[in-house]
Image (cartoon, rainbow, N blue to C red):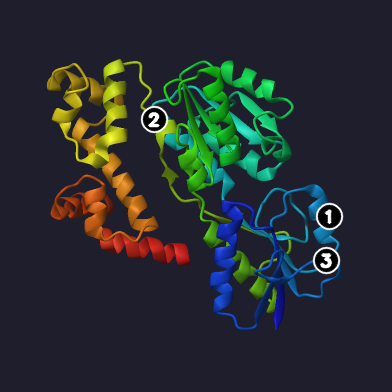
Amino acid sequence: MKSIALCMELSDFYEHGIARGLIRFSKARPDWRIFGYGWMFRPLTDLELWKGDGIIARVETAPDADRLAALGLPLVDVAGAYRRPGFRQVTNDDFLTGHRAGTHLKSCGFERFAFLGVKSTLWSQARKTGFLAATGRASVPVFERDLKWWEGGPEGQGSNELAAFLSGLEPPCALFACNDTTGLRATEFAGRLGLLVPEQLAILGVDDEDIICELASPSLSSVKLDCEGIGYRAAACLDAILGGSGPEPGSGLAVAPKEVVERESTMIYACSDPMVSKAATFIRSRAHEGIGVPDILTVVPSSRRALETRFRAALGRSLHEEIQRVRLGRARRLLRETQLTVEGVAADCGFGALQRFHAAFKEAEGISPGEWRKLSRSQDQG
């Protein structure tokens, strides 16, 4: 039997996903016994005295990294906050996460950007680097504090500094928050300061902790991570190490994030042309309701020809093409993340007729929605 310690408290969405992946792997491994903190595990009350074979841990602080390294057991870190020569790492691809965030916010039409980060952690720095690369900026306004500060609540010491930072940003500005905790703090303070979200300040987080993101006011857009995939691959990595193979100490595997889950905090198109901005924002928020160009003209005071001309000049595509683009983006997320039938996805995305959905999806992806779903899920399971 192999005794495996899971060193995390399952206190948030990220850890829940890691645990799901670990459980999925261990179900096929009858020789694995999982130890952890909490009643649902075989007890792990004192790690220093525990006699086991390997560890999967979320190493968030330098002292924790030192303590775990001193145990001398094979360890796979799933946080990516600190490097240790003896640790293997299976983590989120943080550079790609930041890049995906920057690409999304640029697609919302923003030209001014800012970043909220966790001080002195590698994953936050990598997300910032990817964000800068995607936005084409050498630097942006940055506000960074340590993780305990961000988790301390809106009345914590130094909160006035965050308020001053946000109020000092020139609107309209797109703010990339390195995780949902920082994004929620920004949303809270924006409301206190009277900043309109997303009109003056669009906010995008990371983790997609769906309940708290939906409960935020306005609801928070977020980059969804493949937490279960990280947990599964971390378990596979540790199993290979215990079997005498696996990657060398100090090596790492980065798991690609999933898509941006868009909610109210970024549901806008920032543009100097107010008609284009209003039309694009309307499409982003209502495309799934089955709207057409005539519906856009009911909220934008313009002739169809004039609006089409201005819209294409600003975005490089027609109103109808933008509607299709937004619908297809929603369809991809639903196909990957839900159990809705293909017919249900078509209806939920505003396509109306199933045949129309199939034709649009195949033109965009080269395969049918059903085939795309199977391919996507097989990649997630890989």
Q: Is residue 87 above or below residue 42?
A: above
According to the picture, the residue beneath numbered tag 3 turns out to be 46
Residue 256 image offset from top left, x and y in percent: 51, 53
The residue positioned 16% from the left and 18% from the top of the image is 306
The kind of secondary structure element at disc 1 is: helix
Residue 102 image offset from top left, x and y in percent: 48, 35
The kind of secondary structure element at disc 3 is: loop
Q: Residue furthest front?
A: 39
Residue 71 image offset from top left, x and y in percent: 84, 65
**Amino acid residing under circle 1:** Asp
**Left or right of 239 in this view: 264:** left
Mark 2 or mark 3, whichever is nearer to me? 3
The residue positioned 32% from the left and 46% from the top of the image is 330
Residue 229 image offset from top left, x and y in percent: 53, 61
**Amino acid residing under circle 3:** Asp
The residue positioned 54% from the left and 27% from the top of the image is 137
Front residue of this view, candidates 224 and 344: 344
The answer to whether one can see residue 232 in this image is: no
According to the picture, the residue beneath numbered tag 1 turns out to be 66
Q: Earlier in the sequence, mark 2 or mark 1?
A: 1
**Amino acid residing under circle 2:** Cys
According to the picture, the residue beneath numbered tag 2 turns out to be 108
The kind of secondary structure element at disc 2 is: loop
**Left or right of 358 in this view: 60:** right
Count neighbours of disc 3 (C-alpha within 10 A) and say few if under 14, some if 14 to 19, many if 20 or more. few
Q: Is residue 269 above or below residue 357?
A: above
